[in-house]
Amino acid sequence: MKLKGISTVEQHFEKGVVGVVGLGLVGVLAMQFLTQPNMVTVGKEQPVPPGDAYKPIERTAQGLLAKLDPAAGQSLLPEPPKANLLAQYQQQVNSGVAPRPQIAMLGRGLNLGDAAPRTGGTSDAPIALAPLPAPANPAVYAYAGTINPAEKLRIQELASLLPAAQPYDKQWVSVEASFDGTALKTALETDPDGDGRARAVPRGWFDRIEIVGVQLERQRLAGDSLADTISGRLDSSAEAWSEPALVPPTPGSPNLIGEMAANVKSMTDVEGVLSKVRNDPDSVLRPEFFSMIAGPSWVPPTEAQARDAKLGGKNEVDVLRDKADELERKLKAKEKQLADLTGGSSDRRGPEIREGGGGGGKSGRQQSSGQGTRRVNERRLKQLETEVSTLAKDLDSTRRRIDDLVSGNTRAQTTQVGELKPLLSNSGVKLWAHDLTAEPGSVYRYRTRVVLNNPLFGRTGLGDEAAAKNPLVFGEWSDWTDPVMVLPTQVFFVSSASLRGPATGTVTAGAECFVFHYGYYRRGSTTLQPGDSIRTVAKLPPQLVIYDEDKLKERGVPGQEMISRPATPRERDPEAYNPAPEQVPQAVPPTGTGDAQGVPFDDMGGLVKPALKEIPIHIKDTLLDVSDIPQLGVAANQQARTDTLAYFRTPGGLIAVRQPSVERSSQLYKQVVASEQQGQNQGQPKPEEKPRDIIRDEGPRTPHGHDDGGGGGGG
């Protein structure tokens, strides 16, 4: 039945109202469960749901409990999360670094070198070092000189190795060798046991390896080595040498070997030591010798040997003096030619130039001839001036070198060690070391080895944990050097030996005696009869001085170069020393000690005082007897010549046989005599410097500023 006048909406309106109210009730109910609209705030905490309203109060209570009872507070801390780092690392390694097994090629492959041999083991095999190479070509040389007293003040450890009083004369030995860093790299990459189980060091472990020190080992020759060396009967068989002994480090030089052995506990400590090597490799590998005030300058053993070979046993000062005389002779000749060309005038054109220089009465042909002569003379003039200047400079340089050798006031001009390269790519690393404890008069031989930082130090998983405990690793020893005799403090040579004669009634022997004092050997002589030991006196140059070490400390001199005499005006200011001829001073005695005419001694404000004027020589060898020996191979119709032998008892109770004809030909005799001759002029006044000795560089000039073109002066 249809209702009249009522719409559909009107018919169902009450149903819609009931539906809307029902949805609202459902929404309210959902909000109660799905959201937290009823937040509450407790104290100063953040708003929390009603169900959590007591949690802030609980936390506050627990904080108060932790303050009252720390043990209870520890139990309230949450347990830290547990993580298996090893498992995570292995997972990352096994998973790879790329999203797929193959990636796109990025370009030409880079050659990183051949892989290190791994024939001896697998990845889990123990790691070990193969034997490391030894230094090669060892050279040795014996030195002697006087060490600067300032060095004793600077290096306290040096005092125990020097005499108790000045002059601080010292004999020592230096050893030089070369080391192949590329051979070291090969050894580090080499399988240590061939086909054995061990494997070589991984390449990344030894890229920072360095030489931290050079060690010396020596053997001493038994017997009376001094007499045997002089006579040429030195027995150097293997049985004659003592057991090897390690030479102590040089005082004042870095002792990184001892420092690493005592102080290095971790790989971080190793880096601190290696930085010292890299910052100053010379102080470790090639330590400079001490400053000297007398005696020949130090050069490396190979240079010293070459110098001796070049001189052929001659005195270096005498060789240089001969060179200076030759240069002076050539200089005089060139100055004479220059003076003749200029006519003794300051006019550079010379007489030929002035004569052909033009004049109204000359023909064109004559003028042309004069101009040609002028050009020739100008070229010749310039050539002569250049030659004179070069000769003058060479002469001046040679004289300065002589002065340096006589005074000993030189520093070593050592071999250039070449471009600095990383150790593992340097095939020629120069090494040298010094032995200051060698006993004068003894014969030694030496060998050397390098000490490096251990690339296995501080690492784990080697298979041999003992290899990782020592921060140092040692190379092999080099071959032994040739025997070398440390220069003796006192030595004598038998110059003659005579049988009993009607005049003396006893045998006699003449002896040349030498004592090393103030940088050089000093000579004395005596005649011996049986039962006599050797006693004589050696004279010293009069101008030698010694230094007051207290004054040195006060004046701060130890940081400066010192010489055994006050400097002359020319040495104090070489550039300004260019006086006019009439102002050239007389030579001043270098030490200010005066001369035989009684010039007063200048003590330089108390810094110096006169040294000894003579020194006694006492050698305890005692003459026993003299005999003759016939010469073999003499024909029957010829008179047999004889030679003599002198017999001595040494302080050690041995019998030494000395042959005069052999003594003077020995290398030691030549070396000692050369030193004695060089020391004769030590501290002596220089010859007077004449005006022609003064070298000027003032452009075009006449020879040394003279109109007469005179020759060069003595010097």
Image (cartoon, rainbow, N blue to C red):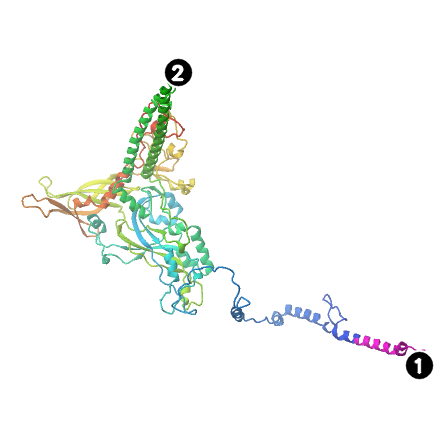
Q: Please state, as top left, top right, bottom left or bottom right, where the C terminus lies in the image.
A: top left
Write down the residue under mark 2: 360
Q: Nearer the viewer, residue 74 or 418?
A: 418
At label 1, counting other C-alpha atoms closer than 10 Å, the crowd grade (few under 14, some 14-19, many 20 or more) is few
Res 591 seen here:
no
Q: Is residue 18 magenta?
A: yes
Q: Nearer the viewer, residue 526 or 185?
A: 185
Taking the image as shown, residue 652 lies to the left or right of residue 599, namely: left
Image quadrant where residue 701 sits:
top left
Q: Residue at x 34, y 31 (%)?
A: 387
Q: Nearer the viewer, residue 171 or 10?
A: 10
* Residue 650, image x, y percentages: 20, 50
Taking the image as shown, residue 234 lies to the left or right of residue 683, namely: left
What is the number of the mark on residue 3?
Answer: 1
Image quadrant where residue 239 sits:
bottom left
Q: Are marks 1 and 2 in contact (CB under 8 Å)?
A: no
